Image (cartoon, rainbow, N blue to C red):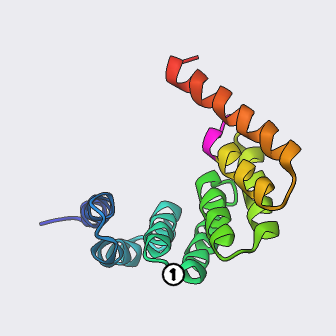
Amino acid sequence: MEDTKEAWQRYFNNGNAFANAGDNEQALEQLEEASKIYPDHPLTWNNMGVAKMCLGHFEESIEYFNKAIALNDRYKDAYHNRGLAYSDLGDLVSSLKDLSKAIDLDEFYWSAFRHRSIVYHLMGNHQKSSEDYAKAQDLYERQERGV
């Protein structure tokens, strides 16, 4: 008989597999089942938010990211993803705040620098956009080299 942890892992893994295959509706169904088993698991809520975002439900995705952050206020990926959702909604100030928070939590988070460079560009701050883009490139290249 499957125990609780195994059931959660199965739903969680299935949800991620569906998401990776581009079936975000099925991903949500599986991840929602996982969240019923372990409602305090921030990664589950973050991944549900990503699935909602991929479906174009940006406002709903923010609620999932809020839940992930409420469960772990140092969860950089949830801040990053919420920043992307805010950007998609045109709320560049909130997007900038969340992307900056993700960077504060991890100064080597190259994708947050890259996305923040885009937000700065959209806001007309080309100097900061250029600086963040260069930083993202440097961090990415270092990561690829294993430095």
Neighbours of disc 1 within 10 Å: few (<14), some (14-19), many (20+): some
Reply above or below: 99 against 93: above
For image coordinates 57% across by 78% down, the residue present is: 58
Query: Whole-percent x and y of residue 3?
Result: 23, 64
Q: Amino acid at mark 1?
A: His
Task: Identify the residue at the far left of this view.
Answer: 1
| Magenta residues, start to end | 107-111
Query: Whole-percent x and y of residue 72?
Result: 64, 60
For image coordinates 25% across by 63% down, the residue present is: 14
Magenta stretch: dominant SS? loop
Q: Is residue 100 left or right of residue 29?
A: right
Reply above or below: 46 against 143: below
Q: Is residue 2 left or right of residue 61?
A: left
In the picture of the structure, the residue carrying the numbered disc 1 is 57
The secondary element bearing badge 1 is classed as loop
Q: Is residue 94 left or right of residue 77?
A: right
Q: Name the quadrant of the N terminus.
A: bottom left
Q: Is residue 108 magenta?
A: yes
For image coordinates 63% across by 63% down, the residue present is: 84
